[in-house]
Each structure stands twice: as C-alpha cells, then as structure tokens.
Amino acid sequence: MPTVFDEEKLVKELSEKKEESLKPEVYSNPSLCGTLNKSIKKIEFELEKLASSRKKISDISDYIDLTEMEGDESMVSDIDSSIDSLEKEINELYLETLLSGDYDLNNAYVKIHSGAGGTEACDWAGMLQRMYQMFADKNGFKWSITDKIDGDGAGVKSVTLKVVGDNAYGYLKSEMGVHRLVRISPFDANKRRHTSFASVEVMPEINQDVEIEIRPEDLKVDVYRSGGAGGQHVNTTDSAVRITHLPTGIIVACQQERSQLKNREMAMEMLKSKLLALELDKKMQESLALKGDAKKIEWGSQIRSYVFCPYTMVKDHRTNYETSDVYGVMDGNIKEFIFEFLKLIN
C-alpha cells in the first residue's frame, strides 16, 4: 500500500479521540461532541477501507497465481476489472486522507456571483449553481438555497447554497475563485462567441463554540422583503436580512426562513464563516509560499475555464488538469478537479 496510508498513526489517533470523547467537558458540549464524533467516524471509515483494499490486493494476487497455474487466459479480463476497481477504491481512500484540514469535515456555504455581462453572465452563474447541486446529489450531500437574486432574463445574479454532509467544505473549497465560460451565446441572434465570468466563494459552516470576534458597532443590518416565485409560500413581510461587516466590506444575506430573527441568526453564521474562510485562505497562501508554489490560489483569481466552442475543454489553471468532457463536468462530475487541487495544496 502507498506510504501515505499510515495505519499505525490512524489507530493511535482513533484511540486518542475516543478517549477525549469520554471527558465530561466534551460530552456535555453537544457541538464539540458532534465534531469529535465526526472525526472518529472518518478515521474508522478510512481504516475499514484500508483493510478492504488490502484484502482485495491479496485476493487479486491469489487470482493471478491461479491463472498462471491453470494457463486460463479467459480469467485475465476479470483480473483487469478487479484491478481497475481496486485502483478506484485506493484513489477514493487517498482522497479521504487529503481532507485533513481543521474544518474540512464541516458543512459548506457556496456563494456564486455573476460577473459583468448581463443575461449571459447570469445564465453562467445559474449553470454553475446547477453543477454544484448535481455534484452534491451525486455524492450524498444535501443542499438548500439560503439566498438568491434572479437574473433579469435568465440564471441568477447571485445565489448562496448550503451544502450539508461530511467533508462538504473539504471538497468544495477547491471551487473558490473565478470561473470562465467560452461559448456561442444562446442570447445572441448573430450566434457570436462570448466569454462570461462568475465568481465562487466557499465558506465552512462553523460550530457555535468557535469564537469569531464581531463587534456590534462594526455591523450594518438591513431588512427587506424576500424575493420569490410567488404562490402560497411567498414572504409578505420584511423578513429577509442583509448584514454588512464594515471593516472588511463583507456582505451576507439570508431570506430562507419566514422569521426575521432566524434569518438574522443564519446571516450571522454566514458572516462568521466568511471571516473564518478569509483566515483559512491566508494560511493556505502562506503554506504554498513556503512550498515555493508560484501559483496563487485566492478569491478573485481565475481558476478554471469551461470552453464549449470552438472545441470542448475544461481546464483548471492551478493544477493544469483538464478534460474534454465539458458536459459531464456541467452535470456535476468535478471530483477529479477536486482531487488534483487537494494533492496540490497538500
């Protein structure tokens, strides 16, 4: 097995975390206890996968020996299939070991902003929203929309998704930055090629026991009537909340709940998450600088291009990973891009 799978270290870490979970100050704190239990389950999962992969290697080795003894070439295709399956399993396990950041296990907020360009840019932001929703669906995550401003003609001007599930932030932090689209515009009567941009922010949802200092005098709070498609669930009161953090200029908003108080609480959670994300990004930059990596990975930098015309290609400009399956990517198949990014930062 690859040396990255340090079984002895994992067993020791599991024992330490189980011992820690028995301390009164831990099990009396639901938030802290929940975080620790997630970590324990993650390590147990990795150890189970490690044992399963090791057994499959042994089984394949025995199968190869049997094939050589009997000289039955018809068994070769079965061996090839088993090796392919094993390789996929080991890569999945390797990916899990790369999700080792302090907040990687947490849920995530994904905020998408359309760039300049009107309807074309809004449509692109909507396409990215669909891509992340499909990624979540395919990988066992749940998602909800916490805030949304529809585009005038199509798509969205901005939308915030909350993605719930183990390692949601660990996976999706790779998506932070500017995404570029090149295609023949369906909104252009002359069928010309257009370039559009959308920015993506990713923040971990943080537990209540994580302290982020925010002074009340640093906040500007606005309430407004929530937008919606109408019908029986449309809000008819000023329940939506927008909070501006004056020192940084960060703006968060929530219109998911009918209660203004609940929307304010959720908006404050998002603000704390965003301030934490800024700090995590700063630490990532410092780590990459120490490694001598010349490529910046930060909000505001172009990270990926999606080209539909004159050829099809999706290319990540940080890792140089690319694929011609642009339609598969738009259907949420972005795990290889995530894998390559995690290898880069680790």
Image (cartoon, rainbow, N blue to C red):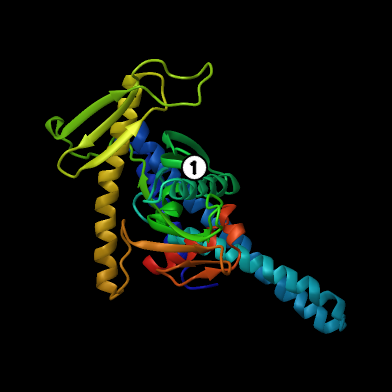
Which one is in front, 245 or 123? 123
Q: Which residue, as the protein is rendered here, is positioned at the far front?
A: 190
- Residue 280: quarter of image: bottom left
Q: On the image, numbered disc 1 is attached to which residue?
A: 155
Instruction: Tell whether 74 sits left or right of 277.
Output: right
Report whether residue 184 is seen.
yes
Local packing at callout 1 (Cα closer than 10 Å; few below 14, some 14-19, many 20+) is many
Point 46% across, 26% down: residue: 228
Callout 1 amino acid: Gly
Residue 343 drawn at (x, y percent): 43, 67
Point 58% across, 61% down: residue: 326
Residue 98 drawn at (x, y percent): 44, 61
Residue 289 drawn at (x, y percent): 25, 70
Q: Quadrant of the C terminus?
A: bottom left
Which one is in front, 57 or 256? 256
Mark 1 element type: loop
Q: Which residue, as the protein is rendered here, is positioned at the far left?
A: 217
| Residue 221, above or below 174 | above
Residue 108 drawn at (x, y percent): 41, 44
| Residue 209, above or below 314 | above
Instruction: Tell whether 243 sits left or right of 169.
Output: left
Report whether residue 27 is seen.
no
- Residue 243: quarter of image: top left
Which one is in front, 295 or 164? 295
| Residue 280, above or below 221 | below
Q: Quadrant of the N terminus?
A: bottom right
Total number of numbered labels? Answer: 1
Instruction: Tell whether 24 sits left or right of 121.
Output: left
